[in-house]
Image: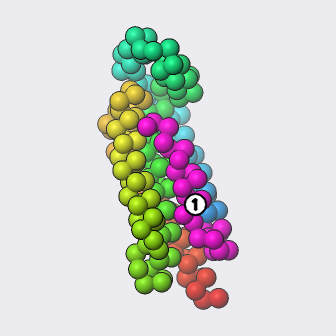
Amino acid sequence: MYATLYLYFPLTLALSPRTRTGLRALLVHLQAQIVLTVASGCVFLICPTEIHVRQQMEQAVQATTPAMREVYEGLYRLDRPWNAWPSLHVSLSLLMLLTCAHFKIKTASHHGFWARTRMDRWVLFAGTMTWLVLCWSILATKQHFFFDIWTGALAGFVTWTLYLRPRLEALQLQSRGQ
């Protein structure tokens, strides 16, 4: 479930409005992802935090099947243990989930109902449940501490509230005025 972060990228594309405003919204969303990643990268450089419990997991992985061992070893090679907080998995996936909800709620409320289809509601519900499982999985794989989840969620929510949502709403107002 740790890798489910990468499902949110195509989900954001799939749920975005198929309009010129929707394309602009995706570009603004991408800017927000960059701002969030750069800010988190600064924290990683200024305050590197090692996940010292990961050694326990690395030892436990040796007792598992060769396929699982390869999966975890690949994960640990790619994701070094010094970038613990804020969790980019949590913050980026939350930012994408909020953007998807915004796309569905705002574009649908313009038409008079919450989401266009049952499928939209189901996809948003599944995305939320997957996000919660992702939060659990980063603890289970010994990639983060509980503090990292909270700081990641806070970073994602602050980026959403102060940066992305106001820009998306401004785009929506512009498109209605045209």
Q: Is residue 158 above or below residue 46?
A: below
Q: Tell me what residue is drawn at x 55 percent, y 82 percent.
A: 173
Q: Is residue 19 magenta?
A: yes
Residue corresponding to mark 1: 14
Q: Specify whether residue 112 is in view.
A: yes
Q: Is residue 36 visible?
A: no
Q: Quadrant of residue 59?
A: top left
Image location (x, y in percent) of residue 32: 56, 57
Depth check, front residue: 76 or 53: 76
- Mark 1 lies on a secondary structure that is helix
Q: Magenta residues, as a range?
A: 1-25
Seen at 50% across and 44% down, the residue is: 5
Q: Which residue is at the far right?
A: 20
Pick whichever, 9 or 47, lies toward us: 9
User: Does 151 sit left or right of 23 as displayed?
Assistant: left
> Is residue 8 magenta-colored?
yes
By secondary structure, the bulk of the magenta-drawn segment is best described as helix
Up-down relation of residue 14 to residue 61 (above or below): below
Q: Residue 150: which quarter of the image?
A: top left
For the N terminus, the image quarter is top left
